[in-house]
C-alpha cells in the first residue's frame, strides 16, 4: 500500500531581456487612472454618507407619520364618542316637556356663565346641576342692605 513515487523538480531561470515593445502610449493613456480612482472613491464615500443621512431623515419622517396617524385615530375616536354623547343628549332633551325643557336650558346656560353659582356635570342619570355650598340660603327675602330689603 505504499508506493514509491518519483520527485519532479522544475528549474526556472530568469533572463534579463529587454522588452522590445514600446508601451509609452499605454502609460500616457492611463496616467490619470490612479487619480480618477481616488476621486471616485471620495465621491462614493461622500455619496454613501449622504445616503445614510437621507435614510435617517426618512426614518424620522416615518416615525412622525406613524405618530400623526395614531393621533388622527385617537381624534376620530373622540369625535365618534362626542357624536354618541350628542345623540344621547338630544334623546334626553326630547323626553322633556315644555317648562322642564326651558328650565333645563336655563340651568345649562347658567352653568356656562362664570360666577353664576350654578355648576353642572354629566352623570349616568343625565345632566345634574348644583349650587356651591353656602349659597343654598340665599334668596330674595334674605338679601338686605342695612334695613332695606332687596
Image (tube, rainbow, N blue to C red):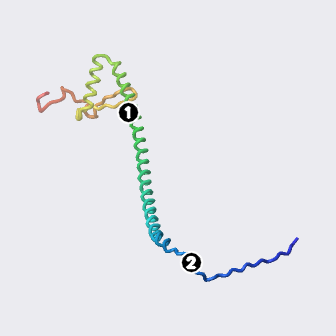
Name the residue beneath numbered marker 1: 79
In this image, 5 relative to 34: left or right?
right
Tag 2 near tag 1, CB within 8 Å: no
Residue 135 in the image: state x and y as whole percent. 25, 32
Name the residue beneath numbered marker 2: 20
Task: Tell me the distance, in whole angstroms, between the alpha carbons under discs 2 and 1.
Answer: 90 Å
Q: Which mark is residue 71?
A: none
Residue occupying the point 48% across, 72% down: 25
3 w.r.t. 113: above or below: below
Helix, strand or loop at label 2? It is loop
Residue occupying the point 38% across, 33% down: 79
- Crowd band around label 1 with a 10 angstrom C-alpha radius: few (<14), some (14–19), many (20+): few
Residue 22 in the image: state x and y as whole percent. 52, 75
In this image, 53 relative to 93: left or right?
right
Name the residue furthest bottom.
16
- Crowd band around label 2 with a 10 angstrom C-alpha radius: few (<14), some (14–19), many (20+): few
Nearest to N terminus: mark 2 or mark 1: 2
Residue occupying the point 33% across, 28% down: 128
Res 100 → quadrant: top left
Residue 134 in the image: state x and y as whole percent. 26, 34
Res 122 → quadrant: top left
Amino acid at each position: 500500500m505504499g508506493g514509491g513515487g518519483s520527485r519532479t523538480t522544475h528549474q526556472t531561470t530568469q533572463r534579463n531581456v529587454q522588452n522590445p515593445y514600446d508601451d509609452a502610449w499605454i502609460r500616457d493613456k492611463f496616467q490619470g487612472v490612479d487619480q480618477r480612482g481616488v476621486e471616485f472613491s471620495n465621491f462614493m464615500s461622500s455619496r454613501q454618507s449622504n445616503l445614510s443621512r437621507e435614510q435617517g431623515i426618512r426614518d424620522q419622517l416615518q416615525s412622525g407619520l406613524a405618530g400623526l396617524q395614531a393621533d388622527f385615530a385617537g381624534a376620530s375616536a373622540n369625535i365618534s364618542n362626542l357624536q354618541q354623547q350628542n345623540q344621547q343628549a338630544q334623546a334626553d332633551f326630547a323626553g322633556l316637556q315644555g317648562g322642564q325643557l326651558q328650565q333645563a336650558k336655563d340651568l345649562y346656560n347658567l352653568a356656562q356663565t362664570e360666577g353664576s353659582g350654578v355648576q353642572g356635570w354629566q352623570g349616568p342619570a343625565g345632566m345634574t346641576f348644583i349650587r356651591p355650598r353656602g349659597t343654598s340660603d340665599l334668596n330674595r327675602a334674605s338679601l338686605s342692605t342695612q334695613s332695606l330689603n332687596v
